[in-house]
Image (cartoon, grey):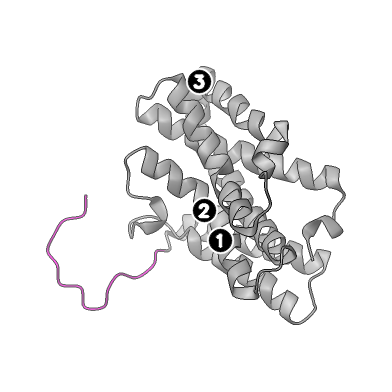
Amino acid sequence: MQLQQFFSPSVQHTLDVVGIFVFAISGALLAVRKNFDVFGMAVLAEVTALGGGLFRDLVIGAVPPAAFTDLGYFVTPLLATLVVFFLHPHVERIQAAVLVFDAAGLGLFCVTGTTKAYGYGLGLTASATLGLATAVGGGVLRDVLANEVPSLLRWDRDLYAVPAIVGASMVVLCIRYDALTPFTSGLAVVTAFVLRLLAMRFHWRAPRAWNRRSTVTEE
C-alpha cells in the first residue's frame, strides 16, 4: 500500500517538492554558516534534501532512485541554494518559519518513506526504519559533510528523530491492523509534525545515560 493510492500524482509530487525545498534551505544555510562557497552550498542543499530518499530507494531496490529520474527533485535544491545565496540574511530572519516547514517535511517524509518501503515488500519494522531514514538521513549526511556531530545524535538538541519514529510507527500499526487510510496517514503526518513543534517550543530532549558521572564538558 502506498500513499499514491490516496493522493493524485500531482498532489504527491507537490508535497514532495515542498519538503525537498525546505530541507534544502536548511542545508544551504548551514553551508553559509560554515563559509562554504556556492558549490558547497549546492552540495549541502542537494544532500540534505535528497539523501534520505536516495538511501531508501537504494535499499528497497527502487532504481534508478526518484532523485535521478525526476528533474524537479534535482533542480529544487538548486533553486533553494540560489535563494539562500542572494537572500540568506532575510532567510535567517525567518528561521522560525523555516523550522516549522522543516517539521512539516519531517512528518511527511517519515510517512511516505514508510509506505513506499512497505509497498516494495519490506516488513513492518524495516519499513518504519526506512521511514525514519527518509526523514532524517539527509540531515545526518549534511552534518557529516559539514564536519559536525549529526544533530539527532546530540543531547543538547531538541527531539528530531523521535517525532519521525512516532509517525512511522503509527503508519506500520495502521498497516498491521488494515487501517491505513487517507485520514490515518494524514494523522501520522500531523502527529510527527506537532511533536516536533512541541519539542522545539518546550526544548524536549532525550535522556542521557543513567547516573552519568562524567565531568567532561560537551563541545
Residue at figure coordinates x 65%, y 74% from the top left: 123
The amino acid on which the numbered mark 2 sits, given as a three-letter code, is Val
Residue at figure coordinates x 50%, y 65% from the top left: 162
Contact? badges 3 and 1 (CB < 8 Å):
no
Q: Is residue 212 magenta?
A: yes
**Structural crowding at the residue carrying mark 1, measured as other residues with C-alpha within 10 Å and reported as few (<14), some (14–19) or many (≥20):** many
Left or right: residue 8 versus residue 197 is right
What x and y, as percent, mark residue 53?
61, 49
Contact? badges 2 and 1 (CB < 8 Å):
yes
Q: Looking at the picture, does residue 43 appear above or below residue 155? A: above
Residue at figure coordinates x 71%, y 37% from the top left: 69
The amino acid on which the numbered mark 3 sits, given as a three-letter code, is Phe
Is residue 96 among what the camera can see?
no
Left or right: residue 180 versus residue 17 is right
Label 1 sits on a secondary structure element that is: helix
> In the picture, residue 76 is in which quadrant?
top right
For marks 2 and 3 on the same chain, the one whose residue lies earlier in the sequence: 3
The amino acid on which the numbered mark 1 sits, given as a three-letter code, is Leu
> In the picture, residue 130 is in which quadrant?
bottom right
Residue at figure coordinates x 46%, y 22% from the top left: 39
- The stretch of residues the image draws in magenta is 205-219
**Residue named by callout 1:** 132
Cα distance between the residues tagged 3 and 1: 30 Å
Mark seen at residue 136? 2
**Residue named by callout 3:** 85
